[in-house]
Amino acid sequence: MATNAKNAQNAQNAKTSKSYVDLTIMLVSHDAFRRDIRRLEKAAAGRAQSGPLDRGRVETGWEIFKTQLHIHHEGEDRDLWPRMAKGLAHRPDTLATLAELEAEHQRIDPLIARVDAAFADPGADSATLEQAVGEFGDCLVSHLEHEEQEGLPYVQEALSEKEWKAFTADQRESLGLTGAAEFFPWLLDEATPGNVRRINSFMPMPMRMALKTLWLPAYQARDSWTG
């Protein structure tokens, strides 16, 4: 809850400093990653305590997690960080931070591969899986905190209103309708009521109806992480 409160305040600060910058979706995405890390850690601990997992359910959750993390990082590396670097050319310290954040993405990738390998190997012991999950989770949580504390606060300084709108439009286009059908239910899973209302307010009515009647039921029917 403390993380949600801090993120909500960061988003509000961004909105009041420059009304065209709203980091709600970015910050709620970070909360969703933390949520899935907890679920992944619980799944790994469950394997240690009770033997084999319900692999289908756990792997469904893990695959969604990986997909959303890949999309998130790709959008930052391909689009957000380069746009920010142009606007912050006068801030060498912040440029160095952006480079660090991108490098952290590269360090996370092999840790994902280690978790994949531990899940896939029926001969791997529980300690191997728990260690792989723990190292991945620690690295990702540290990265999210670094980004929130030293990267995202400069978005509003780096990007003009036109650039911010271009960035958000690019993200919507790259996500597409099929991607949105998975992204928004995943994003809103366990989100606070305030964040649910805020994110729904970004959507046109047809998309809100699709979320309520089609996307959320389909996401919930997959019954992820409950192995």
Image: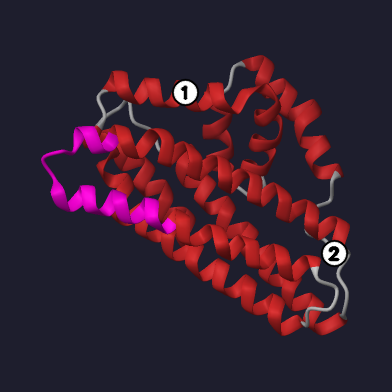
Q: Is residue 48 left or right of residue 179?
A: right
Q: x, y percentage for residue 111?
A: 57, 65
Q: What element carries label 1?
A: helix
Q: What stretch is highlighted in magenta?
A: 84-104
Q: In this view, does 203 lie to the left or right of 17?
A: right
Q: x, y percentage for residue 69?
A: 57, 48
Q: In the rendered view, tell whether residue 176 sits above or below residue 6.
A: above
Q: Name the residue under label 1.
A: 170
Q: Name the residue under label 2.
A: 227
Q: What residue type is labelled 1?
A: Asp
Dominant secondary structure, magenta = helix
Farthest-out residue, left = 90
Residue at x 41%, y 41% (from the top left corner): 77
Residue at x 56%, y 40% (from the top left corner): 71
Q: x, y percentage for residue 181?
A: 71, 30
Residue at x 38%, y 20% (from the top left corner): 166
Q: x, y percentage for residue 168?
A: 44, 26
